[in-house]
Image: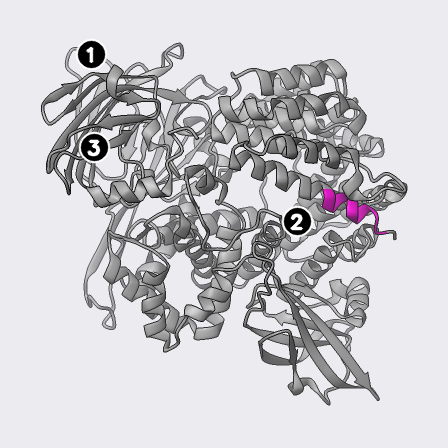
Amino acid sequence: MSNSNLARAEAAARKDLLTVHSYDISVDLSQVQDLHRQGFPTRSVIHFAASRAGAGTFVDFMGLSVESVELNGAVLDPAAVVDDARIRLPDLALDNVLTICATAAYSTSGEGLHRFVDPADGQVYTYTQYEPADARRVFANFEQPDLKAPFTFHVTAPLEWQVASNAHVAAFSPVAGSPGLGHWDFAPTLPISTYITTLLAGPYFRAEDSFSMTFGPDSAQPGAVLEVPLAAYCRSSLADNFDSAAIFAVTKAGLRYFNELFDYPYPFGKYDQAFVPEYNLGAMENPGLVTFTESYIHSSRATDTQFQQRANTIMHEMAHMWFGDLVTMAWWDDLWLKESLADFMGHLAVAEATAWGAKSWTLFASRRKSWAYIQDQLPTTHPIVADIAHLEAARQNFDGITYAKGASVLKQLVAYVGQESFISGARSYFRTHEYSNTSLDDLLVPLSAATGRDLRSWAASWLQTAGISTLSGELITADGAIDSYTIVQEAVDPTTGRPALRPHRLGVGLYNFDDAGSLVRTAAATVDVEGAVTAVPALSGLPAPALVLINDGDHSYAKVRLDAQSQAAALEHVGQLLDPLARSLVWSSLWNATRDATLPAGRYVQAVCGHALGESDIALLQSLVDNAVFAVDNYCPPSGRDDARQLLLTAVLAHLDAAAPGGDEQLIWARTLAALGRSTDRAAAPIRALLDGSAVPAGLRMDSALRWRMWEALAARGQATPAQLDAELARQLSAETRLGRVRAGASLPQADVKARAWAQAVEGGELSNELLSATVEGFMTADSKLLAPFIEPYFASLTGIWAQRSMEIASRLVRGLFPARADLILGSSAQQHPLVLRTDAWLAANPAAADGLRRLVVEQRDHLVRALTAQSCSA
């Protein structure tokens, strides 16, 4: 195991030995615009104490070179103490001063200090991204979350640039004798962890605003005034599209909401938000300077749901200021202490503090919980409170369980104990543990005290077991009335093999047709589901419904199986459900049944074609069409795939024509046409008519983003030439359109194109993270015959990719290039498919491969087997 992969036991030992008092970090970006330079000077001065004189430890650094190491005035020989990603520190004093001068590497993978050249104007931009342990790529430090300290940053960079960090600028001056250079000194931060420190430097456009509020009489600090300077950054070439006023409006609503809710004033001074290129995440909660993917800045037409998703991310990161930054998990086992809580609180804030209101929970049900359900059914599922033995495992656990399942479980907890009690416990948690590190019990104690319930059994059931509960309804009627209704729970922890029946407080809704033909809730009951079988006597004697919905209101986390009568009604009438959340939950049940091969994929596609037109909830509509396209390509049996694809294409074209001009629904149908166009020549004619303007529906704006979706579809079918793609790029050169050109170019169905794309992605090292992903996506847009020659090279290259590439790039390659598109062979089971057997052979031959690599391969194998199994479910 590489010594870059810090183990939990090593971190615990270092924590027992050290107390870090302060960091003083200098970073020199004066030569950043010279693209031939691979690195930049960095200097760390660390003041820390050791509990035992004479003990030894190590500091973390991953860079190009270490020039000098000085410990307590003694110069240490780098050749003797530098060991790969660690610098050994022998013979510590009780109080220590460490100074390390080194050269760090510019990144193109989004890890560490990322350097990006804007194709629109040639300007150079930099920013940092560290989670979980990449601050060591920029400066030497003790890289673990429980060694908090104040940080003081100093940056030398081009004079005209915007330079920002966690704290405000304390001093700025031009560099004497170096025209065109400036030097920024930042104020010390409050005690924070290394992974949430940050730097931003480049010719960014900056917008400014401010927030202020006075705490009310019921606050712990009545009459206190909070003032927070606000700033927002984006690349200069995006300034015309930067809707900073809307971003600031959400930010102010969030700051007011969380400050009042938590009754703990935002502690980190300013609140900057930077939207940066080629970002690996949706966002990162660096206190004082939150970073976001710039895909949230829309240069082309975007739907209301896309703006809602941005608002949700803003709120998610803001919740981290308390859950994660003020109080931080001690080790990555308790990553949920920040991510699960921020995911739940982010949706709660959008629901309670913005105009989207209840749409927040529909988005949560249709997108986030779907992610959780998928992740929780993989062989690599794990408890929300996970067993994280080392950093590599921590990187892999930023997943649908830690985020979305955790948030879903917290939503269930709030329904169980009440929101007021939950927030009271959170307030106590912040006051007790401010600027420190915690684990599971540290949160359970104040929550238990506030709610009057011992939550240890709840935590054992929900946080410390893995897998998903399945809830099925058994409806018995007689003479037009309900005779009995029973909920059956099935749950086994796949990591232990033991039953994991969980307590659920949930709603059961009865739905019938009203005079207008709509399905409306006519009765409901709140039920505490305990054990394997739970009767619902409150429903007995009520008129027999058309449909019964378990978990009505979406308060619990479970896979819901509709009873036979309800599923039949759903397939015929789901679009007539008036309540958007109920509609979303029914669609979720149908999709889970499709994925589990209990509902034929063709039947799901038929339901989408019949009921998606006019869907008012745009987040739900986007999920439906995405699922339908995926089902056609992966879950429909080969014998019925063409018919299903034609059915969907016919519906998409009809719905595109029927949609209201200029609306979100129209845009989604146009995007779906492009998605379908990658796999059928029948879409080419209407796509060309959109591109050349000969048949564009009224109100549809054929902007660059939509045009490139269409060109990628034509390229994938061999109906576009490189010259045509170049001509389209010449219309507008930007980072976004360049990605479109790369993706479309790699999509061309030619053997030499695929070989070139493979070489660039796997054998080369020049592509940045986003250009790599675009190349991989285009490469994989092809039929299985064209990709067959790359199956053996894929498996042969896996260990080399993992050893030689960064974690981010390796993960994108391993996941993205897996040969997942396959058809079930008649007379053979999914488990006996040649691709499954080849994957099994690799796993058997590589038992000692890195845990993270094996996890990715195992997950891709499971997705493949699920697709093949679904294909066996005949219509």
Q: CA distance from mark 3 to mark 2?
A: 56 Å
Residue located 34% across and 21% down the image: 63
Around disc 1, counting alpha carbons within 10 Å, would you say few (fewer than 14), some (14 to 19), or many (20 or more)? few
Question: Could you tell me residue 864's position as x and y percent?
Answer: 72, 40
Disc 3 and disc 1 in contact, CB within 8 angstroms:
no
Q: What numbered label is drawn on residue 178?
A: 1
Q: Quadrant of the N terminus?
A: top left
- Helix, strand or loop at label 2? It is helix
Say which amino acid is labelled 3: Gly
Looking at the image, residue 159 sits to the left or right of residue 299; the answer is left
- Circle 1 — which element? loop
> Who's the residue at 32% across and 22% down the image?
83
Q: Is residue 639 magenta?
A: no
The spot of residue 644 in percent (x, y) is: 85, 45
Residue assigned mark 3: 56
In the rendered image, residue 40, in percent from the top left (x then y), is placed at 30, 18
Residue range highlighted in magenta: 865-873
- Which is nearer the N-term, disc 3 or disc 1? 3
Residue type at numbered disc 1: Ser
- Which residue, given by chain and number where applicable, does mark 2 sit on? 622
- The quadrant where residue 483 appears: bottom right
User: Amino acid under label 2?
Assistant: Gln
Question: Relative to residue 261, is residue 793 drawn left or right?
Answer: right
Kindly check if marks 1 and 2 are in contact, taking CB atoms under 8 A apart as contact.
no
Disc 2 packing (10 Å; few <14; some 14–19; many ≥20): many
